[in-house]
Amino acid sequence: MAVVGHDYHWDFILHTNKLKSVKSLVKQWHTPSDLSRRQDIAITRIRIGHTLATHSFLISKDDPPICNTCQTRVTIKHILEECPIYEPTRTSLNLPHNIKEILDEGQISNIIKFITKCNLINKL
């Protein structure tokens, strides 16, 4: 019964909510047990949209980070879906073209490969 209540409330959360935009149902996200702690942390932070690369400015009181290539704010969506700097790696890994599909449970190994090849894993 409790999950039904969560589903009901989840349905009314605006799609501007980062987590809601990538996770349409209230259910546990499964993460492979063979991930290192660093990889597990990176996947969790990517899923919620809050990483060192995208949100450390809140602690340091600096301006939000801007992509040097695109002159737009650095976000997980920008990194995984939009930035042309990472397009060759996205293409080589055959990553889907939208953030919701990229963050699907079946893409975790590709996300790990992507953030490793792009030298992002320690920035997340």
Image: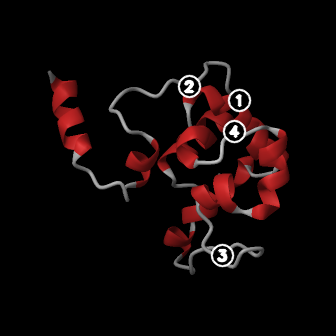
Q: Given contact means CB atoms under 8 Å apart, are the residues at marks 4 and 1 in contact?
A: yes
Q: Given contact means CB atoms under 8 Å apart, are the residues at marks 3 and 1 in contact?
A: no
Query: Which residue is labeled 2 in the image?
Result: 31
Q: Nearer the viewer, mark 4 or mark 2?
A: 4
Query: Which residue is labeled 4 in the image?
Result: 111
State the SS at label 4.
helix
Check residue 66 in the rendering and tell me which mark sits there, or answer none.
3
Q: Nearer the viewer, residue 45 or 8?
A: 8
Distance from Cα at disc 3 to Cα at disc 4: 22 Å
First in sequence: mark 3 or mark 4? 3
Residue at 46%, 44% in the rendered image: 22
Q: Nearer the viewer, mark 1 or mark 2?
A: 1
User: Dot 1 surroundings within 10 Å: few (below 14), some, or many (20 or more)?
Assistant: some
User: Dot 3 surroundings within 10 Å: few (below 14), some, or many (20 or more)?
Assistant: few
Q: Where residue 102 sits: x, y (%)?
A: 61, 41
112 lies above or below 19: above
Distance from Cα at disc 1 to Cα at disc 2: 10 Å
